[in-house]
Image (cartoon, rainbow, N blue to C red):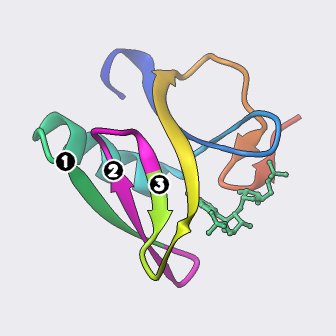
Amino acid sequence: FDGGYQWFYEGRNGWWQYDERTSKELEVSYKSGEKTCELLIAGFLYIVDLENMLQLRRNDPSRRRRIKRDFATVPKKGVAGLRTS
Ligand code: V3L
């Protein structure tokens, strides 16, 4: 991954890393200068707003989470809901 960066979404008290496939999608969109990116996660469509760094459920935008692109080495809860350590 470019410069050791990864993508994260916010959990209750920490950050989850996106799964590898989704991270790659986000990175491509980000690098192309796209303002949004559509993701299919566990059967739900989400919009990622890359300008405001938010993930929103497409059919219920009140379900929103902050996201960040950060060093792969920062503390995290796990990957895509799977706890590490
Ligand atoms: N990747 C994987 N699962 C996701 C993602 C994503 N990008 N976005 C939402 N979900 P919502 P704590 C999260 C899951 O935003 O204890 C974590 O992965 C989301 O899972 O309302 O709060 C954990 O599994 C949630 O289960 O649409 O840190 C879980 O929350 C569900 O989709 C608990 O994490 C609805 O999220």
Between discs 3 and 1, the one toward the N terminus: 1
Reading the image, the residue beneath label 1 is 35
Residue 23 percent location from the top left of the image: 42, 46
Q: Decide: marks 2, 3 in contact (CB < 8 A)?
A: yes
Q: CA distance from mark 3 to mark 1?
A: 12 Å
Q: Is residue 74 magenta?
A: no
Write the start and end of the magenta stretch as one range: 41-54
Compared to residue 57, the image places residue 13 above or below, namely above
Quick one: 67 or 62, which is closer to the camera? 62
Compared to residue 18, the image places residue 51 above or below, namely above
Asked whether, in this view, residue 54 is left or right of residue 29, the answer is right
Residue at point 77%, 53% (across, down)? 82
Q: Quadrant of residue 14?
A: top right
Q: Quadrant of the N terminus?
A: top left
Q: Which mark is residue 55?
A: 3
Q: CA distance from mark 2 to mark 3?
A: 6 Å
